[in-house]
Image: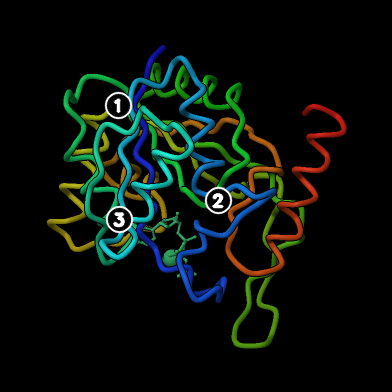
């Protein structure tokens, strides 16, 4: 089943501390942005990529799309102050509201096609679906520096992107969030408050978001593992 994907790429990468957008850092000589875009470029089910970018990056990003032969970017839209604003701008560039739209962080280059397809199928049935992995650590709730309680772990999930929705559902969620000035940390949180059901697809732990410098070591290890094992 086909889908379009909105890729927010308009952040500043402050926590990475690279002095530039972290998406321009390279892994095996290829920019993170391109690693992520290639997954969708190579997926026959992906009918178009909408990329939200910061004005300062436009020239460099356009040159990279050209150099690496990324042809599916149907729109380049302006990023906003917050990630949610960038996604909203992307959503307004989605032509028809009938289909499935994915949102995937440019900073997660290791997403696999098989998981994307499972997610799209689930979203087409339910209207909304997210990729997540079971929480591995024991989680405590604290009051200041004192443990208040140990949270039951079996029902906790660590949520990633991509997240997929019927485009009309995501638009309704964004319109409501904008009206009510609600800022969520992911798309699901604004869809949940419509309210609208969202189902969970179990993904894998490789789908990390490159956030802080040590994530680059993990990224290199994941790429090495893929070369050696093919998965
Ligand atoms: N993003 C965006 N628009 C923003 C903020 C973030 O499009 N106003 C994008 C980033 O480019 C990234 C994704 O959203 O691909 C996830 O955000 P995050 O990992 O927080 O990246 P940054 O905001 O760039 O990093 P930081 O928060 O450390 O500055
Ligand atoms: Mg950020």
For residue 72, what is the image quadrant?
top left
SS for dot 3: helix
Q: CA distance from mark 2 to mark 3?
A: 15 Å
Towards the viewer: 193 or 94:
94
Nearer the observer, 25 or 8: 25
The residue at the point 59 percent across, 41 percent down is: 132
Against 125, residue 130 (above or below) is: below
Residue 114 on image: x %, y %: 61, 21
Label 1, label 3: how many angstroms apart (C-alpha)?
A: 29 Å
Q: Position of residue 89 (x, y in %)?
A: 21, 48
Nearer to us: label 1 or label 2 = 2
Give the vertical position of 130 relative to 185 (above or below): above
Q: Residue at x 69, y 85 (%)?
A: 146
* Disc with the residue nearer the chain's start (1 vs 2): 2
Name the quadrant where ligand 1 sits: bottom left
Which residue position holds label 2? 31
Q: Which residue is mark 1?
A: 166
Q: Position of residue 50 (x, y in %)?
A: 30, 38
> Where residue 205 sits: x, y (%)?
71, 44
Q: Which mark is residue 58?
A: 3
Extreme residue toward the right, this view: 228
C-alpha distance separating marks 1 and 2 = 30 Å
Image quarter hosting the N terminus: top left
N-terminal-most mark, 2 or 3: 2
């Amino acid at each position: 089943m086909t889908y379009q994907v909105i890729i927010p790429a308009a952040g500043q990468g402050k926590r990475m501390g690279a002095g530039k957008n972290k998406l321009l850092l390279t892994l095996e000589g290829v920019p993170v942005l391109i690693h992520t875009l290639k997954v969708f470029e190579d997926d026959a089910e992906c009918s178009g990529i909408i990329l939200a970018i910061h004005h300062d990056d436009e020239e460099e990003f356009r040159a990279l799309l050209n150099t690496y032969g990324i042809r599916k970017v149907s729109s380049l839209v302006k990023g906003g102050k917050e990630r949610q604003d960038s996604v909203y701008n992307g959503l307004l560039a989605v032509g028809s509201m009938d289909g499935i739209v994915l949102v995937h962080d440019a900073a997660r280059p290791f997403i696999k096609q098989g998981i994307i397809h499972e997610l799209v199928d689930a979203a087409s049935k339910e209207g909304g679906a997210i990729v997540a992995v079971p929480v591995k650590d024991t989680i405590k709730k604290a009051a200041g520096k004192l443990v208040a309680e140990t949270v039951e772990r079996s029902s906790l999930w660590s949520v990633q992107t991509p997240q997929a929705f019927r485009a009309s559902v995501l638009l309704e969620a964004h319109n409501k969030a904008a009206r009510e000035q609600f800022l969520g940390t992911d798309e699901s949180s604004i869809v949940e408050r419509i309210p609208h059901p969202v189902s969970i697809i179990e993904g894998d732990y490789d789908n990390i978001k490159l956030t802080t410098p040590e994530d680059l070591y993990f990224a290199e290890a994941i790429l090495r593992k893929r070369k050696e094992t093919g998965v």
